[in-house]
Image (tube, rainbow, N blue to C red):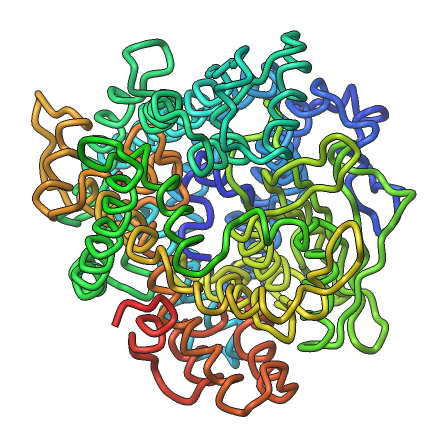
Amino acid sequence: MKKMFLAAGMVAVLMSSCSTGKSTETTNPFFSEWNTPFNVPNFDVISIEHYKPAFLEGIAQQKQEIEAIVNNRAMPDFDNTIAALDGSGKLLSKVSRVFFGLNGANTTPDMQALNKELSPILSAHYDDINLNPRLFERVKQVYDRKADFNLNPAQTKLLEDTYKGFVSGGANLNAEDQETLRGLNSQIAMLQLSFEQNVLSETNDFELVIDNEADLAGLPQGVIAAAASTAKAAGKEGKWMFTLHNPSVMPFLQFSENRELRKKIFNAYINRCNNGNEADNNEVIKQLVGLRLQKAKLMGFDNYANYALEERMAKKDTNVYNLLDQLWPYAVKKANEEAKELQASMNKDGVKGKLQGWDWKFYNEKVMKEKFDLDENQIRPYLTLENVTNGIFYVCNQLYGITFEEIKNIPVPHSEAVAYECKDKDGSHLGVLYMDFHPRSSKRGGAWCGTYRGQSYENDKKVSPVVTIVCNFTAPVDGKPAMLSADETETYFHEFGHALHNLFKDVQYTGVGGVPRDFVELPSQVMEHWAFEPQVLKVYAKHYETGEPMPDALIEKIQKSGTWGQGFATTEYLAASILDMDYHVMTEVPADFTPAKFEEKQMKDRGILSQIPPRYRSTYFRHTMGGGYTAGYYSYIWAEVLDADAYQAFVETGNIFNPEVAAKFRKYVLTPGGIDDAMVMYTNFRGAEPGIEPLLNNRGLN
């Protein structure tokens, strides 16, 4: 429950989550139970006009619930204070999950406008809870007397997290400082929202239109067909259009022989929201960093990173830097080795000058083909979306005995989404899973997993989750199935790991359902290990035309090339993690602060290769500037130390589907939410804390 009510803007980013509007109660779908399969949200009848009344009513109801708690004349105890608070706000959670889920997956101008309108309202509401002195007094009384109550581990953790959440939310501040905090929270939420909307706008606005077929040289036929389809949809039939969405821009950089066009789209990609127009994010960043720092100092911390890290596994900024600094030399050394090979290949082509950022993916592909006789086009025909889905279902069944059955007659969040019922190995219902795979202008970039309904208990009866995976994978074209890249396949496995975490979770109290940010990527990243295991590929990787399984020779090439490119991948990731931390360990923000100059200096001081920008440059770094992973982008590599070690638990037994190891992982990592310290949960599974050696081995960095 740490910071459970802290920032409405953060709830919006993570999708985790007055007039009462009673006049619309009979028609507003949020004000009644959904008479749908498994009581999923009735997406078919929800409209824009339903959200605001539902939000306002949800706020009003939670206010009444809080008042009932503080006006209770009985001595504060766990049930009448802590559990009652944990159970409050059900309607607000119900509408929040649907609105913010759809706003990420299928937004409209009206939804974006409403999001801006709601942001200060929600921020004020959560501050009203955090800063309610009578409520905090009751919480504190229970906390101070916790030894008097016979609490189980989940109750103890909920009590401790609730108390800490109030403290970190400003409950101990004086009245003047609390007012300052309210203003900071509201401004931060609005700026994070503006940042997100600017990135979506700038990503959608760019078009690289090609009308000369010769400029398509080197591009695979599937990529060309997709560009023609995109152009046609944009009213430019007979031409080819490339965008800044990953399934378009990345293959162009990977295969296009036109160096000038690669340069054009590369520069557009890395300069999003850094062009001095209405969507420019430089001033937004400056204000955000400054306001976050003010908030941290108000709360008694020297920088924002230490405020954010207090309840995570890392605990403080020095521990994060220790890990990043430990890995950085390995990554840069490997990247320099790769750069030399790419430069040699470029020289061999007769291209004069130094290897540039827009050359890297193109020559990386050429060198991989020369070194391993392998390129992306050999792999894709075996990795259709249907095949990879079947592969994931197979892995889940082998590990945990669970099954997935498609549901046809059920409301869906978008017409392109598909729904599955997940059943446990005994046939019992675990939850509903939605999956929405392909890009569109109404969907934000990247891939994520969220919930339209979280797992909970109602009157001691378990309420199953409704989970969603949203991606931006290559779409089908010209009657051919969607064929995924290796990266997209790995991403799919990754997000499914998050889905399993949500589906397996079984906690009595909402407030102990979450885990620290630097632990949450363990369930997702460990799933990636099965994606390209030979025995798994033999099951699901089948040619879309012939149905033949991937041949052993191709699987062997994939295995041999497995660590190629990890210098680049690790360096760009670590650079972004360092940049995120560097912004948030600042102890002052100069008046002339410029994000572009700051980023340039931090990266130059680190000795990053000029051809490798951070995976996310500042002006489109949604993870940190949009909230959610603020001072937390390091979490992926922190969790990779855990997941690399966790996978070894399977490998060491000689069976990557070892049912006993899988059962332990489910029991100690996937099921209990956050009822214990994260490292304790991990060591309960593994028996010891991990080192970095398995990670270095996996990435080929040692």
**Residue 604 spot, x, y in % from top left:** 10, 40
Q: How many marks?
A: 0
Is there any visible trace of residue 124 in the rendered image? no
Horizontal side of 601 relative to 464 (left or right) equals left
Position above or below: 394 against 164: below
Q: Please provide percent x and percent y for residue 238.
A: 66, 11
Residue toward you, 39 or 5: 39
Image position of 62 with respect to 467: above or below: above
Q: Is residue 321 left or right of residue 409?
A: left
Q: Residue at x 31, y 37 (%)?
A: 349
Q: Report which quarter residue 328 is drawn in.
A: bottom left
Q: Where is residue 597 drawn, in percent x and y?
A: 13, 28
Viewer-nearest residue: 78 or 370: 370
Determine which quarter of the picture holds residue 99: top right
> Who's the residue at 18% across and 38% down the image?
610
Name above or below for residue 582 compared with residue 512.
above
Residue 37 picture location, percent across and down: 88, 48
Q: Which quadrant holds the C terminus?
A: bottom left
Q: Nearer the viewer, residue 369 or 618?
A: 369
Q: Nearer the viewer, residue 552 or 247?
A: 552
- Of all residues, the one furthest to the bottom in this rendering is 653
Q: Is residue 267 visible?
A: yes
When the figure is inspected, residue 622 is found, relative to residue 108, above or below; the finding is below
Residue 683: image quadrant is bottom left
Residue at image position (47%, 31%) is 252
